[in-house]
Image: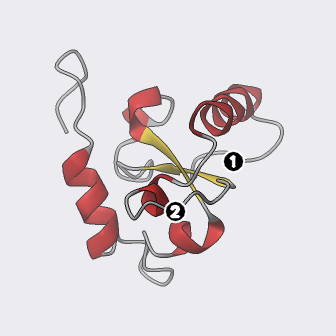
Amino acid sequence: MGFDYSRANHRWRRLRDRVLREQRWCQEAKRYGELKPAEIVHHVWPVEDYPEYAYCRWNLIALTKANHGKMHDRDTRKLTALGEYWRRRVSPPPSSPSP
């Protein structure tokens, strides 16, 4: 069973809304000086592989739908080179369990 992204998961919805409010703009687009409204919250360390990081604020970035699609291979669910780039940039804090 995978992570519950549904509306029924109130904890996730509140955290997702908070990230979208705080970041507002797509973090990938910002790297190139573009301000595009964020629509999706992405787990940098995939929740399928690292469920312990599912609700960690440091593990979440706001993206456009198009940029989110560039983070994962949709068939294998593995991170793409871009997704790996972000994972290298975002490290768990020292107090988090090691990956």
Mark 2: amino acid: Glu
Residue farthest along the bottom direction in this orientation: 75
Q: Is residue 2 above or below residue 56?
A: below
Write down the residue under mark 1: 5
Question: Decide: marks 1, 2 in contact (CB < 8 A)?
Answer: no
Pick whichever, 35 or 10, lies toward us. 35
x, y (%) of residue 94?
16, 19
x, y (%) of residue 81?
26, 74
Residue farthest along the right direction in this orientation: 7
Pick whichever, 77 or 42, lies toward us. 42
Quadrant of the image occupied by residue 66:
bottom right
Mark 1: amino acid: Tyr
Pick whichever, 26 or 99, lies toward us. 26
x, y (%) of residue 7?
83, 41
Is 33 on the left-hand or right-hand side of 45? right
Nearer mark to the viewer, of 1 and 2: 2
Badge 1 or badge 2: first in the primary sequence: 1
Is 1 on the left-hand or right-hand side of 46? right
Q: Is residue 84 above or below residue 76?
A: above
Write down the residue under mark 2: 34
Q: Residue at x 69, y 55 (%)?
A: 39
Residue farthest along the front direction in this orientation: 33
- Look at the image and tell me in which quarter the C terminus lies: top left
Cα separation between marks 1 and 2: 28 Å
